Image (cartoon, rainbow, N blue to C red):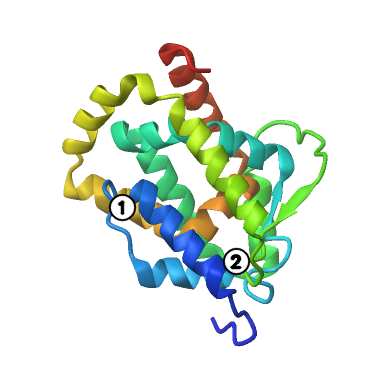
Amino acid sequence: MEFDEAIPDGFAEDFIIALIGEYFGNIAALDEKTMRENVVLGCENGFSEEDRSVRTELVDYLFDNFSVIYLGLLVNDDFRGSFKKAVDLELDLADKSKSYIRDVRQQLKDGPVLPSKGNVVIDLSKFDLAQAKDISMKIRSSMDKIAPFSDEFNSIVQEVTDSDAAAIGFCISNFMFLIRAFDKNPAFENYVRSIVKAVGTNLGIA
């Protein structure tokens, strides 16, 4: 698939690559080539605007619960497997017809669709410094929630296997496909929400 006119902003690209490396560099086998390809998909003329659009409520949720999702990817095989399965599906849909994709999306519906207050449209062909700072702050704020468990967290990181790192790296390197899965695969989103709620309650950070 060619995206000749999808040109990322250099600062935006560097920001995304650095941000991913900061949080996942020590737990995931990241593929820089794949990450940069996903940056292109996040540009105008990369993915369609629909596929670059994420419900505002979902964006807020993912930032707020970043730390719990992060922990889940580290410690739970089933949780990690659900991410890989969701990304695999999105990759498989890349060369499918619109009618086929529509049928698949229909099958993935999981309960009534709640009304949304709007969408955030990803566009990495532009760089907004204030927005970048806001993203960094929100992720850091979420990670602060698990700071009381730093000793346990460090022990978990030391036990990450090559297989675990490969699975996490696959999902995170394909971040645009993962984001699309969250927004376009209700069954996946609802599963993640159920696990995050259970873990957050158990840790007292829900």
Residue type at mark 1 is Gly
Residue 171, percent from left and from top: 41, 53
Q: Residue 98's spot in the image, x, y percent?
A: 69, 67
Q: Label 2 neighbourhood size at 10 Å, few (<14), some (14-19), many (20+)?
A: many
| Disc 1: which residue | 25
Query: 150 or 180, which lies in front?
Result: 150
Q: Quadrant of the N terminus?
A: bottom right
Q: In which quarter of the image is residue 103?
A: bottom right
Image quadrant of residue 4?
Answer: bottom right
Along the line of sight, the residue nearer the viewer: 200 or 50 = 200
Q: Is residue 109 left or right of residue 29?
A: right
Q: Position of residue 19 (x, y in %)?
A: 45, 54
The vertical placement of 26 against 72, above or below, is below
Residue drawn where x is 25% and y is 23% of the image: 152
Answer yes or no: do the residues labelled 2 and 1 have beta carbons within 8 Å?
A: no
Q: In the image, which is nearer the foreground, mark 2 or mark 1?
A: 1
The answer to whether any part of residue 188 appears in the image is: no
Q: Which three-letter amino acid code belongs to the residue tagged 2?
A: Gly
Disc 2/disc 1 C-alpha distance (Å): 21 Å
Residue at x 64%, y 66% (from the top left corner)? 127
Measuring 36% from the left and 40% from the top, which residue is drawn there? 80
> Which label number is shown at residue 42?
2
Residue 125 position by quadrant: bottom right
- Dot 1 surroundings within 10 Å: few (below 14), some, or many (20 or more)? some
Per the image, label 1 sits on a secondary structure element best described as loop
**Residue 135 sits above or below residue 114 on the image:** below
**Residue 20 locus on image (x, y percent):** 42, 54
Q: In this view, does 141 lie to the left or right of 101?
A: left
The residue located at (43%, 45%) in the rendering is 83
On the question of residue 66 being in view, the answer is yes
Relative to 141, is 203 above or below?
Answer: above
Judging depth in this view, the residue of 35 and 88 nearest the camera is 35
